[in-house]
């Protein structure tokens, strides 16, 4: 198609609207211009209204309609030169036959009324302006439409970008939360590790402080020890002569101690060899005592000894054994006194340790074993001379026996276990026991007014205690006497497998025979005999059978008869207990506590020791 060219006048603006847009318009200026154009287009056209009205009147009156096309229209020529245009003169069309009724309100009239400019005659400028305006509107609309589409596309893209950004933000937020959780877990772990390290450091600091304190205490002790050493050195310089004599005496005592050790081994063998002979001799003495008591129950025993006017009723062999034991005790005391005088060492802690172990003795198997082991170690402790340890052990055991509530059988087990490892301790222990209770010998001190100035003097001699010048009651004395005799009875009947009892059952049999042969029947001897039978009667019957029954018969027919003849109310309970023991044959029943209990406090026997 050929290009269309508008032939217009030289006017640049028509009805206030520019034909050519400004080349430097901005988008806002263009929009304002379009709004102004739209306002003008919606208003009635500025054509000659009088002409239009006249034509309309002619149409209404029935006059023919004449269409005049005075303006030039453009036609495309199909000539070889597309740029050349021919001017065609419009022809006049006369529509004389057209009839329009006044009353006809057809669409034609309304169409002309809506768009009157199509029917009006316009000039070339107005037609060109109309076409240009129409094209300009279409072009502007297209641009606006394109702009709107671009804006919508940009808005959609922006929305998509915003949605994508939000999604990325959400993902980042989730990843950040996960990262925060991980960081929080790591932080908590680091806090726990830091706390653990802090506690470890605190513990190490405490240990370090404790070590420092220990070192300080050690250094203080070393300083005190150095001061003691200096004092000892000064003391040595002041007592050189006394020390030289003491050293000589100590050497002599060491030689004597070595001799005693050799004698111990020989004594052990001799005691083992003499056990059978002692048993036979005891049986013979018991038989003789039974015969003697049967023949002459009222006559006194021939075994009476006088020492510095004091008369004892006892067997001669018994007094000899007591003398030997007391002599050993005296020599031990003298030796220990010399050691303490020549040595500045303090044995108080050692003594308290031994005393604490003895006080902890109970009738339980493991307790007895552990206490005996610990006591044996203390008696053989090189830090303390053995003679001093034996002295402490003997005194503490005897003191422990004063309480009637302490377990006598458990004490007997401990004594046998310890003395089997330290034999010399048995004689010292027996000597201490003889000093505390003369009926363990057995012997009886006869009261005579010519010998004792008062009854109190006699009581003190046989073992009564005084507290602030006040003599203890006979009841308290008899309770202690009973406790001593129960421990002695438990000691002689104690039999432990693979352990030698140095003062075993044959000594208990000899004690009973000597007791019945020499001692009179009174409240002291009655309590002693009753306590001894309660503890050792079961074991004596198991071993001596009928011989023991014969002695019980002698007790019933002679000893108890003498007790009843005294008619002392205080003896009634003791007489009844002895008579019941014999008549009910309680010697057939194992006494309570003889079999040590296990750790579970059951009645299971001490299998290793029985």
Image: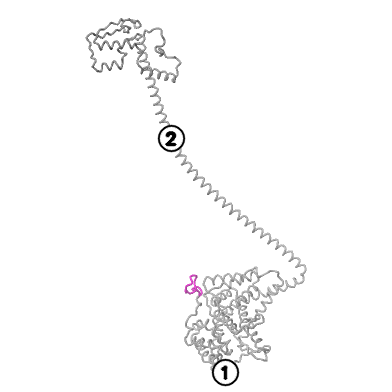
Name above or below for residue 264 compared with residue 199.
Answer: below
Judging from the image, what secondary structure is the residue with disc 1 in?
loop
Crowd rating for badge 1 (residues with CA inside 10 Å; few <14, some 14–19, many 20+): few
Q: Position of residue 151 (x, y in %)?
A: 40, 25
In the picture, which quadrant includes the N terminus?
A: top left
Query: Does residue 138 appear in this view?
Result: no
Is 347 positioned to the left or the right of 593 in the image? right
Check the image and report above or below for 192 versus 442: above
Left/right placement of residue 3 relative to residue 228 reads: left
Toward which corner of the image does residue 76 lie, by quadrant? top left
Mark-to-mark CA distance, 2 and 1 = 128 Å
Which sits earlier in the primary sequence, circle 2 or circle 1? 2
Q: Which residue is mark 2?
A: 166
Mark 2 lies on a secondary structure that is helix
Q: Nearer the viewer, residue 592 or 237?
A: 592
In the rendered view, tell whether residue 84 sits above or below residue 589.
Answer: above
Q: Is residue 458 above or below residue 403?
A: below
Q: Is residue 381 left or right of residue 65?
A: right
In the foreground, 564 or 101: 101
- The overriding secondary structure of the stretch rendered in magenta is loop
Please identify, in this view, whether the residue under mark 2 or under mark 1 is nearer the observer: 2
Estimate the x, y position of residue 29 in percent, counting from the top left. 44, 19
Number of marks present in the image shown: 2
Question: Can you tell which quarter of the image residue 332 is in?
Answer: bottom right
* Residue 87 on the magenta span: no
Mark 1 lies on residue:
298
For disc 2, the neighbor class at 10 Å (few under 14, some 14 to 19, many from 20) is: few
Question: Horizontally, is 585 left or right of 234 in the view?
Answer: left
User: Which range is magenta?
Assistant: 596-610
């Amino acid at each position: 198609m050929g290009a269309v060219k508008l032939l217009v006048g030289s006017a640049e603006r028509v009805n206030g609207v520019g034909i050519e847009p400004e080349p430097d318009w901005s988008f806002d200026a263009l929009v304002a211009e379009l709004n102004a154009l739209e306002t003008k287009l919606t208003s009635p056209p500025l054509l000659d209204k009088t002409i239009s009205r006249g034509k309309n009147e002619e149409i209404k009156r029935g006059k023919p309609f004449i269409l005049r096309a005075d303006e030039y229209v453009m036609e495309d020529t199909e000539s070889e030169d597309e740029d050349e245009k021919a001017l065609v003169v419009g022809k006049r069309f006369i529509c004389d036959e057209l009839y329009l009724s006044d009353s006809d309100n057809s669409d034609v009239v309304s169409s002309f009324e809506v768009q009157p400019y199509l029917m009006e005659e316009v000039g070339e400028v107005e037609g060109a302006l109309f076409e240009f305006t129409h094209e300009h509107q279409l072009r502007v609309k297209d641009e606006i439409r394109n702009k709107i589409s671009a804006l919508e596309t940009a808005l959609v893209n922006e929305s998509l970008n915003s949605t994508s950004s939000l999604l990325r933000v959400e993902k980042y937020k989730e990843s950040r939360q996960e990262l925060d959780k991980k960081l929080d877990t790591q932080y908590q772990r680091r806090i726990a590790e830091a706390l653990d390290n802090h506690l470890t450091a605190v513990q190490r600091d405490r240990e370090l402080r404790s070590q420092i304190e220990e070192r300080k205490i050690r250094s203080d002790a070393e300083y005190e020890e150095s001061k003691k050493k200096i004092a000892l050195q000064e003391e040595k310089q002041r007592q050189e002569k006394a020390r030289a004599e003491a050293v000589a005496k100590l050497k002599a005592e060491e030689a004597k101690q070595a001799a005693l050790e050799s004698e111990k081994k020989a004594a052990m063998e001799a005691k083992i060899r003499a056990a059978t002979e002692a048993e036979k001799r005891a049986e013979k003495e018991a038989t003789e005592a039974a015969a003697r008591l049967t023949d002459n129950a009222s006559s006194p025993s021939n075994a009476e000894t006088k020492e510095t006017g004091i008369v004892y009723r006892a067997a001669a062999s018994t007094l000899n054994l007591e003398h030997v034991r007391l002599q050993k005790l005296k020599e031990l005391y003298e030796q220990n006194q010399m050691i303490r005088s020549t040595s500045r060492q303090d044995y108080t802690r050692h003594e308290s340790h031994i005393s604490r172990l003895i006080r902890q003795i109970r009738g339980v198997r493991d307790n007895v074993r552990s206490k005996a082991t610990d006591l044996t170690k203390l008696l053989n402790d090189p830090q303390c001379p053995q003679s001093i340890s034996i002295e402490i052990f003997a005194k503490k055991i005897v003191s422990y026996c004063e309480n009637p509530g302490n377990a006598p059988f458990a004490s007997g087990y401990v004594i046998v276990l310890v003395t089997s490892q330290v034999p010399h301790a048995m004689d010292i222990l027996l000597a201490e026991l003889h000093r505390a209770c003369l009926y363990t010998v057995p012997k009886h001190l006869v009261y005579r007014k010519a010998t004792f100035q008062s009854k109190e003097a006699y009581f003190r001699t046989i073992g009564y205690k005084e507290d602030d010048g006040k003599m203890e009651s006979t009841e308290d004395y008899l309770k202690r006497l009973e406790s001593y005799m129960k421990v002695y009875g438990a000691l002689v009947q104690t039999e432990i497998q693979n352990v030698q009892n140095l003062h075993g059952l044959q000594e208990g049999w000899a004690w009973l025979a000597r007791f019945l042969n020499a001692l009179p029947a009174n409240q002291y001897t009655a309590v002693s005999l009753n306590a001894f039978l309660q503890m050792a009667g079961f074991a004596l019957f198991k071993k001596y059978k009928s011989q023991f029954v014969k002695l019980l018969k002698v007790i019933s027919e002679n000893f108890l008869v003498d007790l009843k003849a005294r008619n002392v109310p205080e003896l009634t309970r003791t007489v009844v207990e002895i008579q019941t023991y014999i008549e009910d044959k309680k010697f057939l029943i194992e006494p309570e506590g003889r079999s040590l209990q296990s750790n579970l406090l059951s009645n299971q026997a001490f299998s290793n020791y029985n």
